[in-house]
Image (cartoon, rainbow, N blue to C red):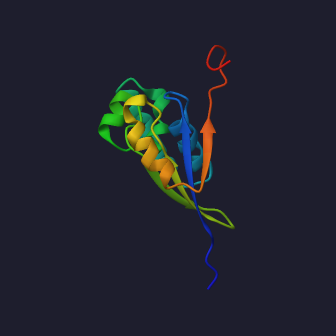
Amino acid sequence: ENVKPLVNLVVVGHVDAGKSTLMGHLLYKLDFVSKRLMHKFEKGSKEIGKSSFAFAWVMDEHEEERMRGVTVDVGVRHFETQKRRITLLDAPGHRDFIPNMISGTAQADAALIVVPASTGEFE
């Protein structure tokens, strides 16, 4: 039996850094999100005036997260590469949800820190 090693990867960063959007886009590009589902997310996010959040909806499933445009709880998705099974943990970045972020990072084997590169962000 050839079992692929599991890697628990948490994505952390400041609120509005684009963590959920980046991970949603990655999962879409890797074909772990269908075009049909992505179309549904694009339509739904546009209807509530948050069209730029469509990819974030891949990770942010709860109504509160989608309406506020902020990750509240750790989003979890699973996918595989040729050599590994990945559990993707999308941690909230808002200070009100630090306890949730800590619970996500406590489960992780590795972390990806997302830092915005826009002028005036974290220069």
Residue with the most extreme bottom position = 1
Residue with the most extreme left position = 63
Q: Position of residue 73 (x, y in %)?
A: 38, 43
Q: Position of residue 18 (x, y in %)?
A: 55, 32
Using the rendered image of the protein, determine whether residue 33 is visible from the camera's viewpoint.
Answer: no
Q: Is residue 86 above or below residue 61?
A: below
| Position of the N terminus by quadrant | bottom right
Q: Position of residue 22 (x, y in %)?
A: 58, 39
Of residue 42 and residue 88, the one placed in the foreground of this image is 88
Which residue is painted at 64% across and 20% down in the image?
122
Picture quarter containing residue 71?
Answer: top left
Q: Is residue 45 left or right of residue 88?
A: left
Which residue is painted at 69% across and 67% down in the image?
83
Q: Is residue 88 left or right of residue 98?
A: right
| Position of the C terminus by quadrant | top right
Q: Is residue 37 above or below residue 45?
A: below
Which residue is painted at 53% across and 53% down in the image?
88
Q: Is residue 98 left or right of residue 27?
A: left
